[in-house]
Every structure is written in C-alpha cells, then in structure tokens.
Image (spheres, rainbow, N blue to C red):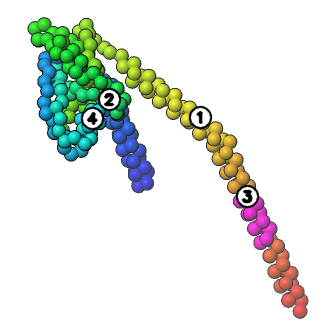
Amino acid sequence: MLNIIKWTVRGLIALIVLGFLHYTLPQHDIVRIVGTYQERQDFEGWTRIFWNDTGDSTTATTRDVQFIQAILPNSNPMVYRNQDTGWGWPFYFKFDTASLQTQSDDAKSAATAPKWMAVRHYGWRSELLSIFPNAVSVRDVAGPDVFIIPYFNIGFFVVIAALALYLRMKWQQFVARRVEPMIADVHETWDGVENRAEDAATGAKWLWAKIRAKLGGK
C-alpha cells in the first residue's frame, strides 16, 4: 500500500512538472493566417491564469484582447491570442503586440494561394475552457511540411540534464564525505555499546555465580 501511495505521488508530481513545461516552453505551428480581430474578454475564476499579459489580468476583470485566426495544414482551425508578456512569467519579454498584429494582418492568405507561416507560441487551446495559446512571433516558411528544430527546448533540456547530473554528483560526494563517515561512527558507537553491554552482562553473571557459590557454601 505504501508503495502504491509513493508511486502515485511521484506520478502526480511528474504530471504537474511535465504539464507546466508543456504549457510554458515554446512550440511552433505551421499555419495559414486567415484573419485577425479584437474582442473584449472577461477574466473570471481560475482560468484567468491563462490570460496573462503585462500583469493587469491578475486584477482587471475585463479588457480587449487581440486574436490571430489561422488554418492548420490538416484544415483544422487554430486561434491564437496576441498579448504582451512584459517582464512577467513566462519570460518571453514580449512587448510587440501591435507589431505582431500588423504582421499577421499582412500575412493573410486564401486557400487558393496559401502563404504558410510559422507561429511560435506557448500555452494550450481549449474550446471547453475558452483558452488560447499566446502567439510570440510569426515568420514565413517554404511550405506546410517544413520541420522546425526546437533549438531552445533542446538546449533547455540539455542544461536541465547537465544540472541534474552535477547535483547528483555533488550529492554523492556529500554522502561519501559526510554522511557515510557519520553512519560508520554511529555503527562503531553502537558496536561499542553492545560490547560493553555484553561485558556487563558477563560480569553480572560471574558475580551472581560467585554470590550463589558463597551462599551455597554456607
């Protein structure tokens, strides 16, 4: 039972960490931009955390938000919000919402003459929760089959892996230098206590034997 609880807790922690990284790290979509618009949005309940901008959404109840409408290569629709992140989390330092909206307007194309764009974004799209990924940048690409290598994500995980290995090495050194000698000292002290206890027990038995011998001799 304890093992089940332990692995359940570990699994939940892993899911939370992976979900956080999946939401925060940059992703790329190849799309055809078909329109842009601006709409008043109400920030209500816990879903307001998905509408972060320069930080005003944490206190404001409503504001105008710009959106970018697009079509994926498989003909499915995708809508991105276009909000500044400012100096807040996540650290994309996005201040060019107006410029990105203008660039997206200029990149609009029809299905008969598609112009494919790579949209760099973070976040999730959920129609049920009415949340949208936040577009960070757009740029031209050669076609819908272009593969974009996620250099940032690769570098991020390489750094995390190197840091984890470094911390593991330091922990092993700490255990070898400090913890193991302490455990060895405890074992030696315990062995000494056991030896003294055995000696005391042997002495007590010897003394009791002598007392009994003397009492018996009388």
Depth check, mark 1 against mark 4: the one in front is 4
Please state which amino acid type lies under the numbered disc 3. Thr
Real-space CA distance between mark 3 and mark 1, rounded to the nearest whole angstrom:
29 Å
Real-space CA distance between mark 4 and mark 3, rounded to the nearest whole angstrom:
59 Å
Asked whether residue 144 is drawn in magenta, I would say no
Residue nearer the viewer, 41 or 50: 41
The image quadrant that residue 209 belongs to is bottom right
Looking at marks 2 and 4 on the same chain, the residue that comes earlier in the sequence is marked by 4
Looking at marks 3 and 1 on the same chain, the residue that comes earlier in the sequence is marked by 1
Real-space CA distance between mark 2 and mark 1, rounded to the nearest whole angstrom:
37 Å
User: Mark 4 sits on what residue?
Assistant: 52
Looking at the rendered structure, the secondary structure element under dot 4 is loop
Real-space CA distance between mark 2 and mark 4, rounded to the nearest whole angstrom:
10 Å
Point out residue 86 in the picture as x, y percentages from the top left corner. 32, 29
Picture disc at residue 169: 1
Please state which amino acid type lies under the numbered disc 4. Asn
Please state which amino acid type lies under the numbered disc 2. Gly
Depth check, mark 4 against mark 3: the one in front is 4
Instruction: From the viewer's perspective, tell me whether residue 22 is left or right of residue 127.
Output: right
Point out residue 9 in the picture as x, y percentages from the top left corner. 39, 48
Please state which amino acid type lies under the numbered disc 1. Met
Looking at the rendered structure, the secondary structure element under dot 2 is loop
User: Mark 2 sits on what residue?
Assistant: 86
Residue nearer the viewer, 204 or 209: 204
